[in-house]
Amino acid sequence: MREEILSVGIDIGTSTTQLVFSKITIENTATTFSIPRIKIVDKELIYRSNIYFTPLISNTKIDGNKVKEIIESEYKKANITPSDVKTGAVIITGETARKENANEVLQSLSGFAGDFVVATAGPDLESIIAGKGAGADKISYDEDSVVVNMDIGGGTSNLVVFKNGEVIDTGCLDVGGRLIKIDPATKKIYYIYHKVKKLAQKIGVYIEEGQIADENTIRKIAREMTRILEESVSLKNRSEDYFDSITNQERGKGIKDGYAFNSITFSGGVADYVYHENSGDPFKYGDIGIILGEEIRKSDLIRKIQIRDAVETIRATVVGAGSHTTDISGSTITYTEDVFPVKNLPILKLSEDDEQSGFDSIGNALREKLKWFNLDNEQQQVAVALKGSKNPSFEEVKKLSQALIYGMADILEKDFPVFVIIESDIAKVLGQTMYMDLKFKKKVICIDSIKVENGDYIDIGKPLANGKVVPVVIKTLVFNS
C-alpha cells in the first residue's frame, strides 16, 4: 500500500503569516501478516505562499477575518480546495499566541482541513518546532553533537538546544527584528518596545517615536541586542540586560549556562541576513531586522561557534505541517476509564539522559519540562512519554511511578486524566501502580509499544480487540529533517 496525501501548514506569527502545502507519501512497511505500520516514506514541499505581515485590529487582537482572507486567497492561488487536504497544522506563535482572540482565530481556520493539529504554541514549544524546521536536530543526531538553534523573529528569539538529536533545553528572549518599527517611506519611527528603549538608554542612546531612523543609532542598539544573544549561549558573562530580556520574566527562562556547543543554526526572518548579505535600504521592511542580522553576522556567535546552514529560515516553523502515522498500541495497557477518543494531545518526551540519571532526575526533569507547555501560566494537557526499562523489577516500577507522579504535580492539580506513553512493554503494571499510588482518584491511561518524539501530537481512538489495544494516530510535524 502506497498513498499520497496533501498536507497544509499555516503559521500566524508575531510579524508574518504564511502557508505551505506538502505532498506526503505514506506506506505500510509491515510484513503481510503483521499489524499494519504506516510510515512516511517521502515528503515534498509543493507550494509556498507569499509572506504577509500578520494583520492586527489592535495591539491585543488579531484581525481574524483578514487572516482568513489571506489563507483563502492562497488556497485559490495553489489551485487547492479544503476537501483536497487530508491533514495539517495551524500554529499561532510568538506574541500573537498571547492575543486575546488567538483561540477563536484558530478555530475559525480549522475548516481548512479535516483533521488539524490545532496548537497555540507557547514560546518553548515554538522553539522546538522552529529548531526542527531548521534541521538543527538532524545535525545534532547525525554528528552526536550539541547544536543550538536561534529562531529570531519579529518579537522574540526562541532558543532550543539539541544533544544527539534530542531536545535538552529551551529559552525565549525579547530580541527581535520588529521591536522597533519604521515607516519605510518616511523612515519615521512609530513603535519602540519598552525593553529596547531601556536598553538604548543604558548606552546613552535616546530614541523616541516620531524620530527619523538613523542607521548608526539603530546599529548601536542592534549590537546590544546581539550581545544579549551572545550572553544567552555563554559567550559572554550574563548581565542584567540579559535577564531583563527574558520573555515573561517572572515565569520565563533562558537556556542554562555552560553548554559546550558544537554548532549553531539560525532561523526566523532575521536569519536570512545572518546567512546572506543585504544590498539596498536596511529599513525596506519597516523594521530593524536586516541590521540585527548583519550585527549577528559580525559577532562572536559566528566567530566562536561553528555556523551551519539551516534547511529553512523564515519558513522553519510553517514547514511543521502535520502528517499522520497510524499505529496500534501494545496489548499490555491500562486505562482506568474509557475516555476515548482523545485528540490533539501534545507529547512531552523525556530524554535518554533524564531516564539514565535515576528516578530523582526523571521527576525533576519532568517538572521542568512541563513548563514548555505553559501558555499564559496555564498548564495544558500533555501526554508524558519515555522509553522505559525492558525488564524492570516491581521495585523499579514503583519508583518510576512515584517519580512520574512527582514530576506531573502541575497536571495532577488540574482535572486532567494522566496520560503516559512508554516504548517498553510495561504499560499495564506501570499504569496500575500509578493508579494505586494516586489513591484511585485519577483517571490513568498508560499505553506501550508506541514511539513518539517532542513536537508530536497524538490521537487515541476507541479500544479494539475486546479492549486489548487502542489505535493511535501520531501526528508528527513534518519537518525537513
Image (cartoon, grey):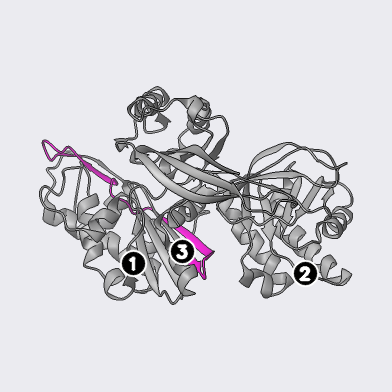
Disc 2 or 3, which lies upstream in sequence?
A: 3
Specify the segment rendered in magenta.
161-189
**Kind of residue sitting beneath label 1:** Arg
Disc 3 or 1, which lies upstream in sequence?
A: 3
Q: Is residue 22 left or right of residue 39?
A: left
Disc 1 or 2, which lies upstream in sequence?
A: 1
Q: Quadrant of the C terminus?
A: bottom left
Q: Secondary structure at mark 2?
A: loop
Q: CA distance from mark 1 to mark 2?
A: 37 Å
Q: Which residue is mark 3?
A: 138
**Kind of residue sitting beneath label 3:** Lys
Question: Closest to the observer: 40 or 145?
Answer: 40
**Kind of residue sitting beneath label 2:** Lys
Q: Secondary structure at mark 1?
A: loop
Q: Quadrant of the N terminus?
A: top right
User: Label 2: how many residues lie within 10 Å, few (<14), some (14-19) or many (20+)?
Assistant: few
From the top left corner, tell me how far across and down residue 253 is, in percent: 49, 59
Magenta stretch contains residue 176: yes
From what the image shows, is residue 287 above or below residue 220?
above
From the top left corner, tell me how far across and down residue 446 is, in percent: 78, 52
Q: Secondary structure at mark 3?
A: helix
From what the image shows, is residue 361 above or below residue 293?
below
Q: Which residue is mark 1?
A: 308
From the top left corner, tell me how far across and down residue 66 is, in percent: 36, 24
